[in-house]
Amino acid sequence: MENAACWVMTECPRGRILRESLEALSVGLSFQKQYGMETVVLWTGLPPEEAQLEYLASLGVKRIIRLEGAGEEGENEDALLFGLHELYLRHKPQYVLFGAGPMSLSLAPRLAALLDVGYVAGATYLRRVGDTLSLTRPLMQGALSEVLRFLPPTRGMASLYPRAFDAPNPAGSPPAERLMPEIHPLPEPKGRPRNPEIVKRALEAAEALDVEDADVVVAGGKGMGSEENFALLEDLARCVGGAVAASRIAVDLGWAPKERLVGQTGKKVFPELYIACGISGAHQHQAGMKGARHILAVNTDPQAPIFQIATWSVLGDAPQVVSEMVRRLRE
Ligand SMILES: Cc1cc2nc3c(=O)[nH]c(=O)nc-3n(C[C@H](O)[C@H](O)[C@H](O)COP(=O)(O)OP(=O)(O)OC[C@H]3O[C@@H](n4cnc5c(N)ncnc54)[C@H](O)[C@@H]3O)c2cc1C
């Protein structure tokens, strides 16, 4: 029987739900509240622990389906693809939502194409208009936005723009009923995981201290000069118990994952200390970090705009200064 349900695909490397998946869950739960749709969590990887189940139940989740057999980190994308295909045809949920986690972004368009269902990537706003769903997404790095609608019979899939939504809040007192995952076995995984790089990135995302949560952020830009030099920032971050962030150019050069981007199109951070290494301080970068309490900037150009907002300025070669800081801190 067809079902007015909204499925939310979650990525759970090391048994922890990625923040990106929680953002998608937040939208799913708002559909449950506003439109009376059932939110169904699709769980991948190791079985959820009791604390996770209690947490999901406290958010208002009433149904969870564990996709079993995609590997410990939910890494076998093909098993997920064909298993979800089968599950979708059986239940026909109205919407399937994906966060901006690495596996989701790879899986979602493939699943939509396999099912021949409408798919919108990078949505920032979703709402029902009559019996259709209207989705907004940014274009040209946020300079424009477009509004799309799933046409009746209005089934569709969407992935969300990272950080466009908050993680959900517990909905009052926890329910008395225990959440029991239903198990859906996936087809046998064949061969190696399709994309080991995605698994690596999901694990990194799960393990790294989030730049938004860190008291000290060590950020690098093009002035770090190379990927090897950029890796020095990890050493510094470890010494000070901080997280590594990056400018747009550093992300585009592949020195850091996009989850580390700070700025207008990246994350907004408000740490006690922001250490900007080889970053010019373009206003799009400043949009994400000028709320830091203290800013230490290292740059070779005395005219660099970052010096105008810095608490402390160091005129010098960033890789050298960072190495020296690490050496002294270790001492
Ligand atoms: C719509 C839009 C949105 C954007 N959103 C973002 C965003 O969210 N975040 C973001 O960061 N950018 C964003 N940008 C890009 C932004 O405009 C800049 O291009 C980017 O921030 C520059 O990165 P950078 O400082 O690493 O590089 P550059 O501007 O090239 O600066 C490199 C700096 O390193 C210094 N340098 C060179 N060698 C050394 C050395 N050996 N030691 C020390 N310093 C050295 C240079 O003097 C220079 O100041 C956006 C742009 C647009 C158009």
Image: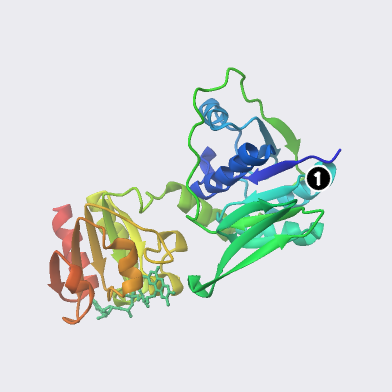
The residue most toward the right is 1
Q: Nearer the viewer, residue 56 or 81?
A: 56
Q: Specify whether residue 107 is in view.
A: no
Left or right, 327 with respect to 51, comes to left
Query: Helix, strand or loop at disc 1?
Result: loop
Amino acid type, callout 1? Lys
Q: Nearer the viewer, residue 322 or 16?
A: 16
Q: Position of residue 275 (x, y in %)?
A: 23, 62
Left or right, 323 with respect to 26, comes to left
Image quarter hosting the N terminus: top right
Q: Residue at coordinates 47% horizontally, 55% vertically from top-left?
A: 163
Q: Position of residue 93 (x, y in %)?
A: 76, 44
Determine the image quadrant of residue 64.
top right
Left or right, 44 with respect to 200, comes to right
Determine the image quadrant of residue 252.
bottom left
The residue most toward the front is 130
Q: Which residue is mark 1?
A: 92
The crowd level at tag 1 (other Cα within 10 Å; few <14, some 14-19, many 20+) is some
Please determine whether, in this image, residue 271 is positioned above or below residue 55.
below
Q: Position of residue 107 (x, y in %)?
A: 67, 57
